[in-house]
Amino acid sequence: MSHFAKVEDSIVVTVIVADQEFVNNLEGTWIQTSFNTYGNVHRNETGPDGGEPLRKNFAGVGFTYDATADAFHEPSPYPSWILDTDTFFWEPPVKKPDDSEDGYYVWDEDTTDWVLITE
Protein backbone atom coordinates (compact mmCIF):
# COMPACT_ATOMS: atom_id res chain seq x y z
CA MET A 1 0.00 0.00 0.00
CA SER A 2 1.11 3.52 -0.78
CA HIS A 3 -0.15 7.07 -0.31
CA PHE A 4 -1.64 8.91 -3.28
CA ALA A 5 -2.72 12.53 -3.61
CA LYS A 6 -5.58 13.60 -5.85
CA VAL A 7 -4.59 16.83 -7.55
CA GLU A 8 -7.00 19.29 -9.16
CA ASP A 9 -5.63 22.47 -10.75
CA SER A 10 -2.28 21.87 -8.98
CA ILE A 11 -3.93 21.67 -5.52
CA VAL A 12 -4.14 18.49 -3.42
CA VAL A 13 -7.79 17.81 -2.61
CA THR A 14 -7.43 14.44 -0.85
CA VAL A 15 -4.81 11.88 0.16
CA ILE A 16 -5.53 8.15 0.35
CA VAL A 17 -3.75 4.90 1.14
CA ALA A 18 -4.28 2.35 -1.63
CA ASP A 19 -2.72 -0.14 -4.01
CA GLN A 20 -1.52 1.15 -7.38
CA GLU A 21 -4.04 -1.11 -9.16
CA PHE A 22 -6.93 0.52 -7.25
CA VAL A 23 -5.65 4.02 -8.04
CA ASN A 24 -5.29 3.13 -11.74
CA ASN A 25 -9.08 2.74 -11.87
CA LEU A 26 -9.91 6.09 -10.25
CA GLU A 27 -10.87 9.20 -12.17
CA GLY A 28 -8.73 12.30 -11.93
CA THR A 29 -5.05 12.87 -11.43
CA TRP A 30 -3.51 10.79 -8.65
CA ILE A 31 0.15 11.22 -7.72
CA GLN A 32 2.07 8.98 -5.35
CA THR A 33 3.47 10.64 -2.23
CA SER A 34 5.66 9.31 0.56
CA PHE A 35 4.82 9.68 4.24
CA ASN A 36 8.56 9.36 4.90
CA THR A 37 9.62 12.35 2.77
CA TYR A 38 10.04 15.73 4.45
CA GLY A 39 12.14 18.61 3.15
CA ASN A 40 13.51 16.47 0.31
CA VAL A 41 14.93 13.95 2.81
CA HIS A 42 13.70 10.39 3.33
CA ARG A 43 13.22 9.69 7.05
CA ASN A 44 12.13 7.01 9.46
CA GLU A 45 11.04 7.34 13.11
CA THR A 46 14.54 8.32 14.25
CA GLY A 47 15.58 10.71 11.47
CA PRO A 48 17.14 10.63 7.99
CA ASP A 49 17.64 7.06 6.80
CA GLY A 50 19.37 7.47 3.43
CA GLY A 51 16.31 6.37 1.46
CA GLU A 52 15.21 8.04 -1.75
CA PRO A 53 12.90 11.04 -1.12
CA LEU A 54 9.74 11.23 -3.23
CA ARG A 55 8.41 14.58 -4.48
CA LYS A 56 10.17 16.70 -1.83
CA ASN A 57 7.39 16.47 0.83
CA PHE A 58 4.47 14.29 1.85
CA ALA A 59 1.34 15.77 0.29
CA GLY A 60 -1.38 17.26 2.44
CA VAL A 61 -4.80 18.60 1.57
CA GLY A 62 -4.36 22.18 0.37
CA PHE A 63 -0.74 21.65 -0.68
CA THR A 64 0.39 22.64 -4.16
CA TYR A 65 1.80 20.12 -6.61
CA ASP A 66 4.48 21.73 -8.79
CA ALA A 67 4.55 19.50 -11.87
CA THR A 68 7.69 21.13 -13.27
CA ALA A 69 9.66 20.36 -10.11
CA ASP A 70 7.66 17.18 -9.37
CA ALA A 71 7.24 18.44 -5.81
CA PHE A 72 4.57 19.00 -3.15
CA HIS A 73 4.66 22.05 -0.87
CA GLU A 74 2.47 23.80 1.67
CA PRO A 75 0.73 27.08 0.85
CA SER A 76 2.89 30.13 1.57
CA PRO A 77 2.37 31.35 5.14
CA TYR A 78 3.05 34.96 4.07
CA PRO A 79 3.30 36.72 0.69
CA SER A 80 6.88 37.83 1.36
CA TRP A 81 8.24 34.35 2.13
CA ILE A 82 10.35 32.57 -0.49
CA LEU A 83 10.08 28.95 -1.58
CA ASP A 84 13.36 27.06 -1.09
CA THR A 85 13.62 24.96 -4.26
CA ASP A 86 15.74 22.30 -2.56
CA THR A 87 13.52 21.53 0.44
CA PHE A 88 10.30 23.07 -0.90
CA PHE A 89 9.78 24.76 2.47
CA TRP A 90 8.84 28.43 2.73
CA GLU A 91 11.59 30.64 4.17
CA PRO A 92 11.28 34.17 5.56
CA PRO A 93 13.18 36.89 3.71
CA VAL A 94 14.88 37.78 7.02
CA LYS A 95 16.47 35.12 9.23
CA LYS A 96 14.68 34.61 12.53
CA PRO A 97 16.75 35.90 15.48
CA ASP A 98 17.87 33.44 18.10
CA ASP A 99 15.40 33.00 20.93
CA SER A 100 15.47 35.69 23.57
CA GLU A 101 15.27 35.28 27.33
CA ASP A 102 12.79 38.19 27.27
CA GLY A 103 10.18 36.56 25.01
CA TYR A 104 9.71 35.02 21.60
CA TYR A 105 9.70 36.22 18.00
CA VAL A 106 6.75 36.32 15.61
CA TRP A 107 6.67 37.31 11.96
CA ASP A 108 5.21 40.73 11.09
CA GLU A 109 4.24 40.79 7.42
CA ASP A 110 3.65 44.57 7.45
CA THR A 111 7.30 45.26 8.26
CA THR A 112 8.58 41.97 6.77
CA ASP A 113 10.62 41.38 9.90
CA TRP A 114 10.58 39.52 13.19
CA VAL A 115 9.08 41.19 16.26
CA LEU A 116 10.01 40.32 19.83
CA ILE A 117 6.97 39.57 21.96
CA THR A 118 7.56 39.93 25.68
CA GLU A 119 5.40 38.34 28.35
Image (cartoon, grey):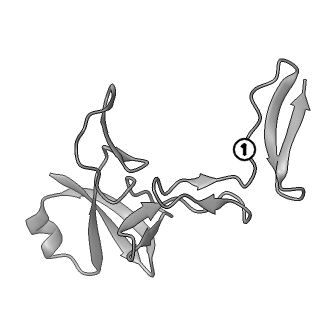
Q: Residue at x 80, y 41 (%)?
A: 106
**As drawn, 110 above or below 94:** below
Which residue is at the front of the view, 64 or 83? 83
Note whether 99 is above or below 43 in the view shown.
above
**Whole-percent x and y of residue 109?**
82, 57
Frontmost residue, 118 versus 92: 92
Q: Residue at x 19, y 54 (%)?
A: 2
Q: How many marks?
A: 1
Query: Badge 1 local density, few (<14 within 10 Å), some, or many (20+)?
Result: few
* Image quadrant assignment for residue 110: bottom right
The answer to whether residue 18 is left or right of residue 105 is: left
Badge 1 is on which residue?
Answer: 95
Q: Quadrant of residue 93?
A: bottom right
**Name of the residue lying farthest toward the top:** 101
The residue positioned 87% from the left and 41% from the top of the image is 115
* Residue at point 72%, 66% (across, down): 79
* Left or right, 9 with reference to 119: left
Q: Quadrant of the C terminus?
A: top right
Q: Quadrant of residue 76?
A: bottom right
| Residue 57 percent location from the top left of the image | 40, 53
Q: Judging from the image, what secondary structure is the residue with disc 1 in?
A: loop
Say left or right for 62 vs 2: right
Residue 16 lies, in percent from the top left, at 29, 58
Q: Is residue 80 above or below residue 10?
A: above
Instruction: Name which residue type carries label 1.
Output: Lys
Residue lying furthest left:
21
Q: Position of residue 5 (x, y in %)?
A: 33, 64
Q: Is residue 104 left or right of residue 69?
A: right
